[in-house]
């Protein structure tokens, strides 16, 4: 990596220095983060519950450690000797029982914070979500001073992420632990398991509509832009005790995003636009049917999904630029061109 690269400058510890622990190491963000840290010469510990499918982690500088966010002793063992922890593990979905979300995103975070304190970790970087600020539809500007809104009824993901973030923020400055919270927009890029695949499935079936004409601005963050920000959040002294918003820094409408994906995929763009109230009502009906049938897999349409795709907000990135020295490196056009290569 080039010596002038801000990421290399931010975390240029040698392989014989303190370890860096990454939770969720087999996930979309965690896997990219582990690879970036290893490329810098860091001693990386990749925390996972899995015992198979770990080929991507089998490289020099990476130590795979078995553990579970609901098994506190395993977290203490994983954190011992680590100076920095990135908490990327979470239950990310718009479907499932409340207790499952709270076990992963609340109890898991609480257990990890306790383990960091016991192991003498210097800094914990917690991966949050911009959804804790609600999913407004009025185009308002949201920054780190904006107060979170009460989650919509039944939105267990947002409810649990808000509570997990609160635990991480309140842990700052106690037991010698510094904490930093990074709130990303909708994370996308090659390997994305959540955002793009649903759009792709609908586009391929010719069933993807615009909602309200698709004129709303969407808060996207390419996984490479997010990883750059996370690395800086883990190393820049001014990041201690702070919250940062990260998106791609572009005003991209939902229509532009959907059309870009359709063009890259080589399928027709949507031809239909549906009003938001109609989509939300349909989502409620689909959810009700799915619950009556006790489906474990997410239905094709949920109220969270409808609110998510219709969200219209502008996210202020001035703080991350000013205090972290961060700039998004991958634009939407560049990212979408490589999406299906």
Image: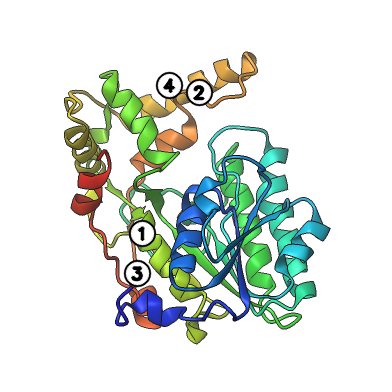
Q: Assess disc 1: are there few (<14), some (14-19) or many (≥20) residues with their C-alpha within 10 Å of its C-alpha.
A: many
- Residue located beneath label 2 in the image: 299
Q: Nearer the viewer, mark 1 or mark 3?
A: 1
Q: Is residue 338 visible?
A: yes
Q: Residue at x 73, y 51 (%)?
A: 68
Tell me which numbered mark, 3 or 4, is placed earlier along the sequence: 4
- Residue located beneath label 1 in the image: 224
Tell me which numbered mark, 2 or 1, is placed earlier along the sequence: 1
Proximity of marks 2 and 4: CB atoms separated by less than 8 Å: no
Tell me which numbered mark, 1 or 3, is placed earlier along the sequence: 1
Q: Assess disc 3: are there few (<14), some (14-19) or many (≥20) residues with their C-alpha within 10 Å of its C-alpha.
A: some
Q: CA distance from mark 2 to mark 4?
A: 12 Å
- Residue located beneath label 4 in the image: 282
Q: Which disc is residue 317 wearing? A: 3
| 171 up-or-down from 270: above or below | below
Tell me which numbered mark, 3 or 2, is placed earlier along the sequence: 2
Q: Residue at x 32, y 24 (%)?
A: 202
Left/right placement of residue 254 relative to residue 290 reads left
Q: Is residue 143 visible?
A: no
| Quadrant occupied by the C terminus | top left
- Nearer to me, 174 or 196: 196
Q: Nearer the viewer, mark 2 or mark 4?
A: 2
Q: CA distance from mark 1 to mark 4?
A: 35 Å
């Amino acid at each position: 990596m080039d010596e002038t690269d801000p990421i290399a400058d931010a975390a240029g510890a040698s392989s014989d220095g303190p370890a860096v622990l990454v939770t969720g190491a087999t996930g979309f963000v965690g896997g990219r983060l582990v690879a970036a840290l290893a490329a810098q010469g860091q001693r990386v510990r990749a925390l996972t519950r899995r015992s198979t499918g770990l080929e991507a982690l089998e490289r020099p500088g990476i130590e795979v450690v078995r553990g579970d966010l609901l098994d506190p002793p395993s977290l203490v063992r994983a954190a011992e000797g680590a100076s920095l922890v990135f908490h990327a593990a979470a239950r990310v979905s718009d479907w499932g029982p409340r207790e499952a979300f709270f076990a992963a995103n609340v109890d898991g975070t609480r257990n990890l914070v306790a383990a960091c304190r016991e192991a003498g970790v210097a800094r914990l970087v917690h991966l949050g979500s911009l959804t804790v600020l609600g999913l407004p539809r009025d185009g308002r500007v949201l920054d780190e001073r904006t107060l979170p809104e009460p989650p919509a009824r039944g939105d267990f993901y947002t409810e649990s992420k808000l509570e997990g973030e609160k635990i991480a923020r309140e842990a700052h400055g106690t037991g010698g632990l510094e904490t930093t919270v990074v709130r990303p927009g909708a994370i996308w890029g090659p390997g994305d398991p959540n955002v793009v695949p649903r759009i792709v499935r609908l586009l391929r079936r010719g069933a993807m509509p615009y909602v309200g004409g698709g004129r709303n601005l969407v808060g996207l963050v390419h996984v490479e832009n997010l990883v750059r920000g996370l690395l800086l959040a883990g190393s820049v002294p001014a990041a201690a005790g702070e919250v940062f918003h990260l998106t791609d820094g572009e005003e991209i409408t939902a229509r532009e995003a959907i059309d870009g994906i359709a063009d890259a995929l080589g399928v027709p763009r949507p031809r239909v636009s549906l009003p938001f109230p109609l989509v939300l009502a349909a989502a409620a009906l689909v959810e009700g049917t799915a619950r009556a049938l006790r489906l474990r897999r997410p239905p094709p349409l949920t109220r969270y999904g409808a609110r998510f795709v219709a969200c219209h907000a502008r996210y202020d990135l001035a703080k991350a630029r000013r205090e972290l020295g961060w700039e998004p490196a991958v634009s939407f056009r560049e990212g979408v061109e490589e999406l299906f290569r």
